[in-house]
Amino acid sequence: MSRPKCLQTYVSDELATRARAAAAASGLAVSEWLRTLIVRACDNDLSAASDRSVLIKLYRQSLFTMVGVDALLAGHSDHALRERVHTVFADRCRAAALSESTDEGSSHEA
């Protein structure tokens, strides 16, 4: 077995504190926690940094779709359709134990 190699980088005090806290929350030493992130990144797994960017991209796309669908519903000739869709959405959210709030999309006002 070959000897482990040392990799070194300099980070801000804030980032060092955050890394130590994340490692502790995972029950790992900082070096073990960093090694895990490096392995994931090298294996092309989603890294912690890309997880957030993927979520932001999905949120933006979902928000655009939500606004577009709501606009189509608001302009539909069946003026009750929009309210029925919101009712079914709330029912399905309750069934899935999710928040029923439409605050992130549109409200029930026409």
Image (cartoon, grey):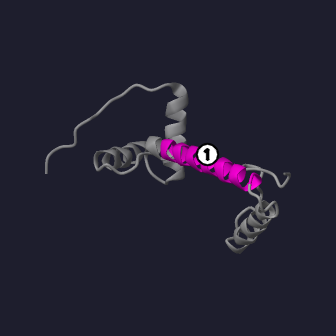
Residue 20, x across and y down, in percent: 50, 40
Residue at 22% of width from left, 43% of height from top?
Answer: 4
The residue at the point 43 percent across, 47 percent down is 29
Q: Splitting the image into 4 quarters, where does residue 77 fall?
A: bottom right
Q: Position of residue 38 (x, y in %)?
A: 33, 44
Magenta: predominant secondary structure element?
A: helix
Q: Which residues are magenta?
A: 52-75
In the foreground, 11 or 46? 46
> On the rendered structure, is 43 left or right of 80?
left
Q: Give coordinates of residue 74: x percent, y percent.
A: 76, 53
Give the residue furthest to the right: 109
Q: Which residue is mark 1?
A: 64
Occupied quadrant, residue 90: bottom right
x, y percentage for residue 94? 74, 71
Query: Alpha-carbon neighbours of circle 1 within 10 Å: few (<14), some, or many (≥20)?
Result: few
**Picture mark count:** 1
Q: Residue at x 29, y 33 (%)?
A: 7
Q: Residue at x 51, y 31 (%)?
A: 15
- Amino acid type at circle 1 is Phe
Q: Is residue 4 left or right of residue 35?
A: left
Closer to us: 104 or 32: 104
Left or right: 18, with 36 as reference point: right
Task: Report if residue 6 lies within the magenta region.
Answer: no
